[in-house]
Image (tube, rainbow, N blue to C red):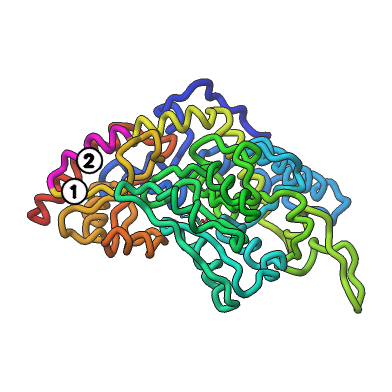
């Protein structure tokens, strides 16, 4: 049904052929897509897998004995094994399908496990968190739970020593991103989880900017929860994963109630389904999950280490070339070893939205604004930044196009 992936070694030009959208022209120019941190493009293998589901075996899962339902259930459930292997989880019961990172984190914050937190308990986050790993925790403040923040150094790395001070016996959970969507900083998640555990706290990792870009191993990192989004890793929108250690997921109450998440329903009471379905109420994004499975196959065929290597080369090249532009301020570490394929910057006093508009005239798609990290943007002393982000299909030539367009923008704005 699905065409065999032809990739053998890493070759961005070869990879690009699988992404129909990259042939687009924007404002008369060849599209340069530098916004994969917001959402990645999709290869035709993923698009075709979704189409095949709808045109060949569209049916609801789990509840049907007919052939189409069986095929759909098999395809949908089969993806759990792929996710398990991707992040090196122990068992399929630990893999919960969600709509994305945001929903995954909300399942943890909304569950009774954390509803059992009491006044005086503490949560430790960092100032570089995306709103989806920040706002759900802030919402707990009204219950008297204190939220503390680890700060960053001038180079955009975390002040690691602050974890040792802020994480105490009062800390119940430490929730940190593996990689920042604004600074690109790759955090030492393993060490942070270790400090959390030494204090009997749980560790939740926001891996939205990690799982698509580098090998992630939940056993090695020993995190308790890991959240990531399918749409940032070549998969369809509306897909994501919550990984949780089984004993914790067993303890947790569901946060959404309805069909499929139950074992038995009576007019007086209901009992919950086994893991992982306990957390998956209602008809899910079946086509999306099937597409995500193909996206995982695609990424693994290339190899996550190769993807990391490619992005490291791109970011090294981008840092080297962009820093030569007069008036540019680049945020985040200048060392590609600790930086993912994300580069946020500002050009003199040009507003990032104006800059992004000029880049768009040149066919270059970047993002401008606070990137759902308002506290971090404020911490940097800015109101907004412009962000270019890279993925498997980007090339050094595209970074050259970005640099040329930024030089043009300097002339337009007279800076
Ligand atoms: N965390 C990080 C670090 C992110 O970059 C994003 C997406 N920009 C999210 C969480 C939220 O992901 P989603 O919108 O797919 O739920």
| Residue 322's disc number | 2
For residue 74, what is the image quadrant? Answer: top right
- Where is residue 272? Give x, y as percent: 84, 63
Which segment did they paint magenta?
316-326
- Residue 250 on the magenta span: no
Callout 1: few (<14), some (14-19), or many (20+) C-alpha neighbours within 10 Å? some
Q: Quadrant of the N terminus?
A: top right
Callout 2: few (<14), some (14-19), or many (20+) C-alpha neighbours within 10 Å? many
Say which element carries label 1: strand
- Where is residue 245? Give x, y as percent: 71, 49
| Residue 328's disc number | 1
- Where is residue 100? Give x, y as percent: 58, 55
Say which element carries label 2: helix
For residue 267, what is the image quadrant? Answer: bottom right
Helix, strand or loop: magenta stretch: helix
- Where is residue 393? Give x, y as percent: 41, 35
Q: Is residue 291 visible to us here?
A: no
CB atoms of marks 2 and 1 within 8 Å: yes
- Answer with left or right where residue 342 lies relative to residue 163: left
């Amino acid at each position: 049904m699905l065409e065999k992936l032809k990739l053998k070694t890493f070759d961005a030009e070869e990879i690009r052929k699988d992404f129909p959208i990259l042939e687009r022209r924007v404002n008369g120019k060849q599209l340069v897509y530098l916004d994969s941190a917001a959402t990645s493009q999709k290869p035709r293998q993923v698009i075709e897998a979704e189409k095949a589901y709808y045109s060949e075996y569209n049916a609801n899962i789990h509840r049907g004995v007919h052939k189409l339902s069986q095929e759909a259930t098999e395809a949908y459930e089969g993806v759990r094994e792929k996710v398990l292997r991707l992040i090196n989880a122990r068992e399929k019961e630990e893999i919960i399908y969600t709509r994305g990172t945001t929903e995954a984190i909300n399942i943890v914050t909304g569950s009774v496990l954390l509803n059992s937190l009491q006044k005086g308990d503490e949560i430790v986050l960092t100032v570089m968190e995306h709103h989806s790993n920040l706002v759900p925790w802030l919402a707990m403040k009204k219950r008297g739970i204190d939220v503390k923040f680890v700060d960053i150094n001038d180079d955009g790395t975390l002040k690691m020593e602050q974890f040792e001070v802020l994480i105490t016996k009062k800390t119940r959970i430490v929730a940190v991103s593996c990689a920042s969507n604004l600074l690109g900083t790759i955090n030492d998640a393993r060490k942070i989880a270790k400090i959390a555990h030494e204090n009997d706290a749980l560790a939740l990792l926001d891996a939205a900017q990690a799982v698509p870009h580098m090998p992630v191993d939940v056993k090695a990192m020993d995190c308790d929860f890991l959240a990531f989004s399918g749409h940032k890793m070549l998969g369809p929108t509306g897909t994501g994963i919550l990984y949780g250690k089984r004993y914790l997921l067993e303890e947790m109450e569901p946060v959404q109630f309805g069909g499929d998440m139950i074992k038995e329903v009576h007019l007086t009471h209901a009992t919950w389904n086994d893991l992982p379905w306990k957390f998956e109420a209602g008809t899910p994004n079946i086509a999306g999950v099937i597409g995500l499975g193909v996206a995982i196959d695609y990424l693994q065929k290339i190899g996550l280490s190769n993807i990391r290597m490619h992005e490291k080369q791109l970011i090294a090249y981008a840092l080297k070339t962009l820093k030569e532009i007069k008036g540019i301020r680049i945020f985040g570490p200048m060392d590609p070893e600790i930086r993912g394929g994300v580069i946020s910057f500002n050009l003199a006093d040009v507003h990032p939205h104006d800059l992004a508009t000029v880049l768009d005239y040149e066919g270059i798609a970047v993002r401008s604004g606070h990137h759902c990290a308002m506290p971090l943007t404020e911490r940097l002393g800015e109101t907004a930044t412009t962000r270019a982000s890279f993925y498997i299909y980007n090339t050094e030539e595209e970074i050259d196009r970005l640099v040329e367009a930024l030089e043009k923008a300097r002339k337009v704005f007279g800076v």
